[in-house]
Amino acid sequence: MAESISDVQHRITSTKNTRQITTAMQMVQTSKLNQIQKAAVGYQDYVAKVKAVVMHLAKSHLLDDSSSDSKSDQSTKKVAYLVITSDRGMVGSYNSNVLREANSFIEEHSGGADHLILAVGGTGADFYKKRGANVAYEYRGVSDVPTFMEVREIVKTVTTMYDNNLFDELYVLYDHFVNRLVARFRAEKMLPVDSETLSTDASEEAPEETLTASYDMEPSEKEVLSMVLPQYSESLIFGAILDAKTAEHASSSNAMKSASDNATDLIADLELRYNRARQAAITTEITEITGGQEALNN
């Protein structure tokens, strides 16, 4: 049954209202993206300095003995995966991409062995709970532009769980923000901070550099590292959350733009159908009037 003119007109009005909402949401998400990018720039400078210090120590072989952990001697290690997703929908394919890649990585890396899920974001927490995964920790409600003091609760809880031997290794799984159109999945080992991992990272950061300097440590090596390494771990975890939140805002902004563009296309199609239906109705009325006039003349 063909739609009436009033039905088509109602759909046009409804779609225009939807487009107004999605356009407004796109503007809001773009504003949030700009804010978090500004915050990320300053934080990246801080992370670069902390990373440079730790990498320097790694390449100077000061971490060979000091960063060794008794956990590394265990034959079987329990691994935890910190999966970062959003708390809400309307973020395009952001959550589905993260969860799909995370599941693939966990399956390949764990090989079916027992592992823990630490979920930052309600979508990931609900996803793994419904599938019977061992969700040892969840955090919901990360703000749109998170601060370190806000995320410190997450960092403190995760590091405490590690110190209490609830797991031996921690991987953070999230979408890395490349630009406003592109995000790439990352799986980074955050704990333990060991010499092997740091040496690998150091060679990637500056493969041509050879460090031969000797260090006189005051206070002791152990005391310096006890301050630097936790700070390094905290900065990496917070940086991953900040990065993931940036990718989330970009994905949401793109999703709202796509919705607005689709609404515009639909409105154009509906208006064409409306004009054709109206033209057909007018033609029918003219035909009826002409037929009636001819009947009177006869």
Image (tube, grey):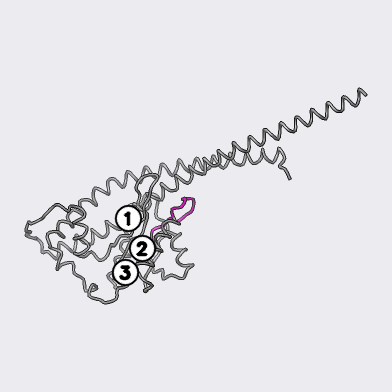
Pick the quarter of the image with the N terminus.
Answer: top right
Q: Are marks 1 and 2 in contact (CB under 8 Å)?
A: yes
Give the residue type that dot 1 points to.
Answer: Ala
- Give the percent coordinates (x, y) of residue 30: 42, 42
- Counting labels gives 3
Which of the pair 137/293 is nearer the observer?
293
Q: Residue at 46% of width from left, 52% of height from top?
A: 93
Q: Residue at 45% of width from left, 45% of height from top?
A: 254
Considering only order in the chain, which callout, 1 or 3, is on the residue closer to the N terminus?
A: 3
> Looking at the image, is mark 3 or mark 1 nearer the viewer?
1
Q: Which residue is mark 3?
A: 161
Give the SS element for disc 3. helix
> Looking at the image, is mark 3 or mark 2 nearer the viewer?
2
Residue range highlighted in magenta: 81-94
Q: Which mark is residue 82?
A: 2
For residue 61, side relative to residue 139 (left or right) = left
- Give the percent coordinates (x, y) of residue 202: 19, 56
Q: Which residue is mark 1?
A: 240
**Real-space Cα distance between discs 3 and 1?**
19 Å
Give the residue type that dot 2 points to.
Answer: Leu
Give the residue type that dot 3 points to.
Answer: Met
For residue 111, side relative to residue 263 (left or right) = left
Which of the pair 205/6 is nearer the observer?
205
Q: Residue at 38% of width from left, 58% of height from top?
A: 84
Q: Quadrant of residue 64?
A: bottom left
**Real-space Cα distance between discs 3 and 2?**
12 Å
